[in-house]
Amino acid sequence: MKEITVKKGQILQRQGDVGTKAFFVKSGLLRTYAIDEKGKEHIFLFAPEGSVAVDHMPPEQPADLFIDALEDSTVIVWEKTTELAEKEALKIIFRMILLQKRMIMLMSSSVIERYQYFVETYPDITERIPQKMIASYLGVTPEALSKAKHRH
């Protein structure tokens, strides 16, 4: 475990990397995301202070996600080990429950309901990230998000 400082825009992990790590955010803001075959970015989660950004893949397998810094950040880097995996097992289960809730919400909710869910989930970062990233997280275009917000 070691503490590092990363600059805004710095990529900590690339999709396909092997030997990935877990990143605990002491200060700043990270995000995890994938890029599809058409080059479109899909944001999986935001990791503000007190959160962990980690790919679910074991360190010996290629990562599914990119992890980068949206702000200058201080993070604690954890090696992915059996011990870490055991400690993180309950957190992972909790995250999977939240992910399931998010997937159901994305399939069945209006754009404004999705946005309200985002604000409830990440109340401290809505002003810290661009609207296009919020739209990506919600699975809509920035234009659709803007229209929905102006209607309500």
Image: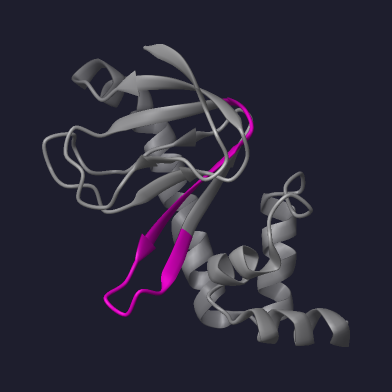
Magenta segment main secondary structure: strand
Start-end of magenta stretch:
26-43
Q: Is residue 75 magenta?
A: no
- Residue 101 versus residue 31: which sits nearer the camera? 31
Give the color scheme: rainbow, by chain, secondary structure or one colour.
Answer: one colour
Quadrant including the C terminus: bottom right
State which quadrant residue 19 falls in. top left
Quadrant including the N terminus: top left
State which quadrant residue 142 falls in. bottom right
Above or below residue 38? Residue 130 is above
State which quadrant residue 138 falls in. bottom right
Total marks in image: 0
Residue under the point 11% across and 35% down? 60
Q: Give the image location of residue 78, x and y in percent.
A: 35, 20
Q: Is residue 32 magenta?
A: yes
Image-based side of 87 in relation to 138, left or right: left
Image-based side of 26 in relation to 20, left or right: right
Q: Give the image location of residue 130, x and y in percent.
A: 69, 61
Residue under the point 48% across and 61% down? 43
Q: Give the image location of residue 30, x and y in percent.
A: 54, 41
Q: Give the image location of residue 71, x and y in percent.
A: 63, 40
Above or below residue 141? Residue 14 is above
Residue under the point 71% across and 74% down? 113
